[in-house]
Image (cartoon, helix red, strand yellow):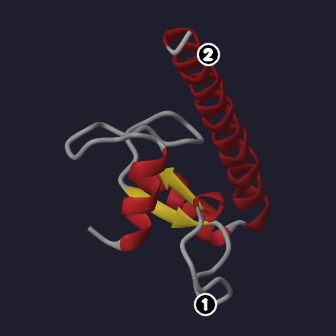
Amino acid sequence: MQNHTKVYFNFFNYEKGDIILCEFCGSVAVDIHHLERRNKIKNDFIENLVGLCRDCHIKAESDSSFNMYCRIKHLENVCVQVHSLIQVNKRLNEYRKNRNK
């Protein structure tokens, strides 16, 4: 598994064998697309990686406005995931505080 795929899987808590949906159209994703070309960004940051089906990937590669829509949708998904992780962390900290009383 390539490094960018590991970053994507780890961030969204996917397991090997999980079905991943295209972040744009909702069909089965088969590609991890770099929103900004890999030669511009040396590291694989989650903000730059989006799971897409083959049709959306081809469209994102050839249409810069569609690529921007994918970026916006992906950043919304990242924000939802981060918010969820923050909420889990808050509940965990509350649990630890109450347990130690």
Judged left or right of residue 53, residue 17 is left
Rendered view: 77 above or below 59: above
Q: Is residue 19 left or right of residue 83?
A: left
Q: Residue at x 20, y 42 (%)?
A: 17
At x 46%, y 55%, the residue is: 8
Q: Residue furthest left?
A: 17
Extreme residue in the front direction: 101
Q: Are marks 2 and 1 in contact (CB under 8 Å)?
A: no
Give percent across and percent down for residue 53. 44, 50
Assign a secondary structure to mark 2: helix
For disc 1, the marked residue is 39
> Which residue in the protein does label 2 denote?
94
Q: Residue type at mark 1?
A: Asn
Q: Is residue 86 visible?
A: yes
Residue count near mark 1 (Cα–Cα under 10 Å), binned few <14, some 14–19, many ≥20: few
Name the mark nearer the viewer: 2 or 1: 2
Residue placed at 70% from the left, 66% from the top?
63
What residue sits 59% from the left and 66% below the top?
Answer: 45
Work out which quarter of the rendered image holds the C terminus and state it.
Answer: top right
Is disc 2 surrounded by few (<14), some (14 to 19) or many (20+) residues within 10 Å?
Answer: few
The quadrant holding residue 67 is bottom right
The amino acid at mark 2 is: Glu
Residue 44: image quadrant is: bottom right
The image shows residue 49, relative to residue 80, as above or below, that is: below
Q: Secondary structure at mark 1?
A: loop
Report the Cα–Cα distance between label 2 and label 1. Answer: 44 Å
Q: Looking at the image, is 36 positioned above or below residue 51? A: below
Residue 66, position in %: x, y?
Answer: 72, 56
Q: Position of residue 29 (x, y in %)?
A: 40, 47
- In this image, 80 relative to 9: left or right? right
Residues 18 and 31: in front is 18
